[in-house]
Image: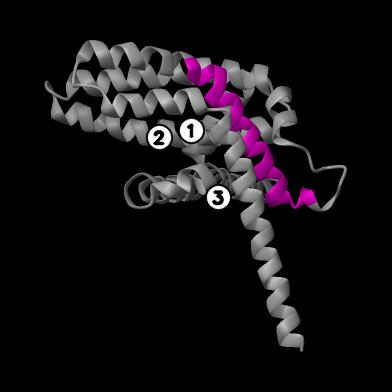
Amino acid sequence: MHNGVGFMGGFYAISEWIMRFSIANLYWVLFNVPIGLLLLSLLYIEESAGSALYLTVPVVALLPVMFFPATTALFAKAREWVREEEHTASSARSFVSYYKENYKTSFIGGMVFVAVWGVLIADIYYFSSRNEALMYLFMIMGILLFVWTVNYFSVAVHYDMTFFAGFKHAFLITVGSPLVFLAVALSCGVILYISLYIFPLIIPLFTGSLVAFLSFSAFYRLHRKLAG
């Protein structure tokens, strides 16, 4: 009898986590539908520089407007899960409320990060046919920038900081904590590889939520350690 109760309790807990992850992830996908459609179009257009540029420009323009606010809201939900705030009715909040609350800060963050990413990608493209060593150096910098971007989302939803203070704090975490860097880089790398190359069907259900949950978990462990 006790084994049956324990099994049902475990099954319920797993089902609850699946529901949390999938609902939040679906919201995240819905808020990014225009970007997703443009990216899908890029995969099927003829190999023409003009056509690619025609679709790339709106994608870049929409990232600060849609992707960054939606991802910040997703990380805010992940913060609830990690801190187990959803067990208290006063703390559980909707994806949409987080989206509205953090929109201005995440929009500014998106503008800055998109600009930095644009410079880095341009450098990689430029040196890919001119200097292979520099190209690989910039690719390594790309991994650093990726972790910095992910850590910024965690900082933005956990601290009440101005954008530039959060931007700096996320950078210090990225370069100052090798364990957090490795945890974020490896977990995100594995999830994205599986999502893009092995099982793409998990993208609308779990990819974003898993990235946010694991990344914020790594950040929050460091936060608690530093807080004593």
Which structural element holds mark 1?
helix
Compared with residue 69, is residue 16 higher up or lower down, i.e. above or below?
below
Q: For mark 3, what is the residue?
A: 214
Task: Provide residue 45's location: percent of width, then percent of height.
Answer: 25, 22
Q: For mark 1, what is the residue?
A: 148
Q: Which circle's residue, 1 or 3, is located before the other in the chain?
A: 1
Q: Nearer the viewer, mark 2 or mark 3?
A: 3
Q: For mark 2, what is the residue?
A: 144
Which structural element holds mark 2?
helix
Compared with residue 202, is residue 60 higher up or lower down, i.e. above or below?
above
**Quadrant of image for the N terminus:** bottom right
Which image quarter: residue 123?
top left
Residue drawn at (60%, 25%) of the image: 69
The residue segment tinted magenta is 62-86
Amino acid type, mark 3: Leu
Q: Is residue 223 left or right of residue 62?
A: right
Query: Dot 2: within a 10 Å radius of its alpha carbon, few (fewer than 14), some, or many (20 or more) residues?
Result: some
Amino acid type, mark 1: Trp
C-alpha separation, residue under disc 1 versus residue under disc 2: 6 Å
Amino acid type, mark 2: Leu
Query: Dot 1: within a 10 Å radius of its alpha carbon, few (fewer than 14), some, or many (20 or more) residues?
Result: many
Q: Is residue 79 left or right of residue 142?
A: right
Q: Is residue 212 left or right of residue 228?
A: left
Q: Which circle's residue, 2 or 3, is located before the other in the chain?
A: 2
Which structural element holds mark 3?
helix
